Image (tube, rainbow, N blue to C red):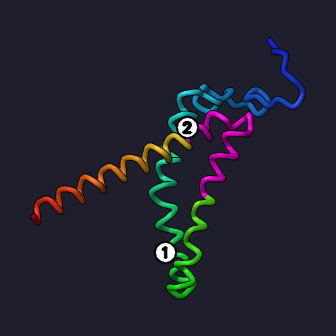
Amino acid sequence: MKTEQAPGEVTGHDTGEESPSWWHRDHPTFIALAGFFSGMLSVMLVPGAYAGILRLLFDYDTAERLFPYILLILVVPAVLAVVPRTRRFGTYMLIGMALTTLVVLCVASLVLYFMVRSQA
């Protein structure tokens, strides 16, 4: 029995393979988790990698002057959050970036507080 398909739509029946399962399509939970963890990883890995590359390519003063351009990383999830097809992913990427930054700052302040308090 042949099913109707839209023009340009590719299914697994065209190639002899099974059609993609829900895991390979836009599952809402998968998109949210992938966006959150992408934001978390981008906050943790990209600034360090950027600083390392700048330090390898330029002298210390130039690398220090160019480092604030790391804030351009915020453009990626902002654009993703505006485009309708990637809006959910971009929103969760922004949430992941914000929460990771908040957790890192809170932990750093607590560690600093306890270190200063133990010295007194």
Quadrant where the N terminus sits is top right
Q: Which residue is mark 2?
A: 92
Q: Nearer the viewer, residue 67 or 20?
A: 67
Q: Amino acid at mark 1?
A: Gly
Q: Is residue 109 above or below residue 89?
A: below
Tell me which segment is drawn in magenta. 73-93
- Name the residue rendered at 55%, 72% in the picture: 67
Residue 50: quadrant of the picture:
bottom right
- Neighbour class for label 2 at 10 Å: few (<14), some, many (≥20)? many
Label 1 element class: helix
Residue 119 in magenta stretch:
no
Return the residue found at the far top.
1
Query: Label 2, label 1: how many angstroms apart (C-alpha)?
Result: 27 Å
Q: Amino acid at mark 2?
A: Tyr
Q: Is residue 62 left or right of residue 84?
A: left
Quadrant where the C terminus sits is bottom left
Mark positioned earlier in the residue sequence (2 or 1): 1
Q: Is residue 101 above or below residue 115?
A: above
Q: Which residue is mark 1?
A: 52
- Name the residue rendered at 57%, 64% in the picture: 70
> Picture coordinates of residue 102 (x, y %)?
40, 47
Return the residue found at the far bottom.
59
Residue 28: quadrant of the picture:
top right
Q: Is residue 51 left or right of residue 76?
A: left
Residue 85 in magenta stretch:
yes
- Neighbour class for label 1 at 10 Å: few (<14), some, many (≥20)? few
Predominant SS of the magenta segment: helix
> Picture coordinates of residue 39 (x, y %)?
52, 47
> Picture coordinates of residue 13 (x, y %)?
76, 26
